Amino acid sequence: MSDSTSPLRRDDVAKVARLARLILTDEELDLFTVQLGQVLEHANDMNALNLADVAPTAHPYGLTNVMRDDIITPSLAPESFLSQAPDVQDGRFAVPRILGEAP
Amino acid sequence: MTTAVSIAHDVATGATTASAALESSLATIAERNGEINAFLYVDTDRARAMAASVDERIAAGETVGPLAGVPIAIKDNMCQIDVPTTCSSKILEGWRPPYNATVIDRLVAAGAIPVGKTNLDEFAMGSSTENSAFGATRNPLDVSRVPGGSSGGSAAAVAANMTPVSLGSDTGGSIRQPAALCGLVGLKPTYGLVSRYGLIAFASSLDQIGPFTTTVADTALLMEVMSGHDPMDSTSLPEPAPSLLAHVNEGVAGKRIGLVKELYEGSDAEVLESVRRAAETLREAGATIVELSMPELSLGLSAYYLIAPAEASSNLARFDGVRFGNRVNAPDVTAMMEATRTAGFGPEVKRRIMLGTYALSAGYFDAYYGQALKVRTLTIAAFQKAYAEVDLILGATTPGVAFPFGSKTKDPMAMYLNDVFTIPSNLAGDPAISVPFGTGEANLPIGVQLLGPGRSERALLAAARVLEIADGRA
C-alpha cells in the first residue's frame, strides 16, 4: 500500500493530468499516485516475462478497412445535434478563444 | 417469472396485449425503482405509444416480430433518439441523442418496447454500479449488497421483475458479473456479432453488447434479433445472425469441456462447489470433462487494466465540452476543456483516463501498453491451444457472491480483482455466458461461466440450458 516502491512519482501524475486535460487537487494527486502505482505494480507480473519474440495484438480479430460504394446517403440533420451542443453560433459549434490573441 | 418468449407468444396470439405487458412492467418499476435505483429514466409515454402501435397492428391482422410486446430495459450507454442518455456521468446529463443505436432499431423492428434507461458505473467503468454519478443500484435479492457492474441497473431491472429482459455491455465482464450476482443468464457475444453503432465507446477492442435474461431461451431469442451484419459498425462481422433458439435443447452429448483451473482457483468454497457440480452435471449429460491449466490467463488482469484504460483515455477525449454534453465556461478553450472534464467526470473515470494516458505516454508505451498487447497475444494463443482439445471451457464467473456496499470502493485493485475470470474472453474476443448454478453465502446466487471459441454461441447456449434444467430453473 505504500508508494515507496511505486513506479510512479507524484510529478508523473501531475504531468499526466495536464496531458489528459484534468485538474487534480493536492489530495487527488496523492491518492492517484498511490492507486495508479498499485495497478502498475500488479502489472509487474507481466513485465517480468521476456516477450521480445511475441507479436502485439491490438484487436481480437484483426481490423481490415471497410469500403462501401461512393453513393450519397441521408445523414443527420444539423439541427438534430446542434440543438444538443453547449454553444452554437450561425449553425456552428462555438468555443472560447483558441489562439492567444487579444480578446 | 414471465419470459420474453412467453410474452411474445401471448401477445402474438391475443392471450394478452403489448399494452397490458407494458403496464405490468411500469407498475413494478413504480413500486420498486425508488428502492433499487435500476432505472435512471423511464420513457413512459413513448413506450405506451409503441405498445399501442403493436396492439393496433395485431388487431389489423398484420404480422408482428418475434419480440412483439416484450418490455426491455436499456443500459444508459446506448443511444435512443430523444431519450436522455448519460452513461451515468454528469458530463452527459441532459443530453438527448439524435440517432438510435442499431440494437434499438432492431429490437423495435422486432416488436420490443424499450421502457427506459438503466444505471451503470460511469462510462461502464466498475464492477458494482457504485461509480454512478446518480447513486448506486441495489441488488434486488439483498438490498444491502451491490448488483455487480458495470451493467448493474440492467441486471437489477430483470432481477426485480421490472422488465423480463434487458441489454448490457461487457468490456471486462460487465454483463456476466452482474448476471452472476443477480441470478440471471448473461451473455457476452463473439466480438463483432452484435453491432455497437450507438454504444458509447469505452474500450473499442473489447466492448460488446449482450442480453440479461431469466432463461437461456430468452437469450437465444434476443441474440437472433440483435445479431447480424451492420454496415454502420466497421467491426461488425459480415455474416447473418445465427439460428439459436431452435437449438437450445441440443444438449452436450459428445462435447469435450475443459475445466480450467485458472478460472475458478481462489474462489469461495460454495463457488468451487458450484463449478464442481456443474462439471458433474455436464458429464452426466454426455460431455467429457477435461481438466486443463491455462497459466497465461492469470496475466489477463494486468493486461486488461492497461489496455482498457488506454483505449478509454482515447475514446473519452471527445468529452471536452465542444459538441455535446455539459460545458464549464472559461476564458480560453484549453481552460474550458479542463474545467469541463474536471467537473464532469467522477473519480474512477479520472483514474482510468490517467492510467491510460500514462500507459500510452512517451517513455512508458513499450513497457506498459506494448507489453499488455503481447500478453493479449499469449491469451489468444492459450485459448487456441485449448480449443484444439476441447469444445467449450467451464469455470466460475466471479470469485464470490454479491458483496456489501462500500466493501471494495476504497481499494481499486480489490475491485478490479473481481473481474479476473471474465476478462480473458474480452481479450480474446470470444463469447462467454454466465448461468446461475447453486447458491452461496446468505443464499445468494452463484454464476458458473461457459466459454467458447468465436461464433460458438449455439453450443454455449445448449450447455447453459443443461445447467439451467439441472438447477431447476426452467
Image (spheres, coloured by chain):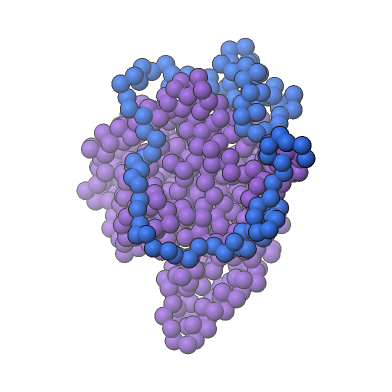
Chain colours: A blue, B purple
Whole-percent x, y for residue B273 in the image: 43, 38
Instruction: In the displayed orientation, state which residue is furthest to the top.
Output: A4
Whole-percent x, y for residue B259 in the image: 33, 36
Q: Tell me: B185 left or right of A12.
A: left
Q: Tell me: B119 left or right of B463.
A: right
Whole-percent x, y for residue B473 in the image: 45, 57
The quarter of the rendered structure image containing the C terminus of chain B is bottom left
Quarter where residue B79 is shown: bottom right
Residue visible at 38% across and 39% down? Answer: A59
Q: Tell me: B88 left or right of B164.
A: right
- Above or below, B197 against B417 in this view is below
Instruction: In the displayed orientation, state which residue is furthest to the bottom.
Output: B60
Residue B283 in view, yes or no: yes
Residue B274 in view, yes or no: no
Quarter where residue B294 is shown: top left
Which of the pair B311/B386 is nearer the observer? Answer: B311
Instruction: In the displayed orientation, state which residue is furthest to the front.
Output: A102
Whole-percent x, y for residue B73 in the image: 56, 60
Residue visible at 47% across and 33% down? Answer: B307
Number of marks in picture: 0
Residue visible at 44% across and 81% down? Answer: B13
Residue visible at 51% across and 52% down? Answer: B199
- Above or below, A40 against B112 in this view is above
Q: Tell me: B405 left or right of B110.
A: right
Which of the pair B398/B75 is nearer the observer? Answer: B75
Which of the pair B345/B432 is nearer the observer? Answer: B345
- Above or below, B22 against B243 in this view is below
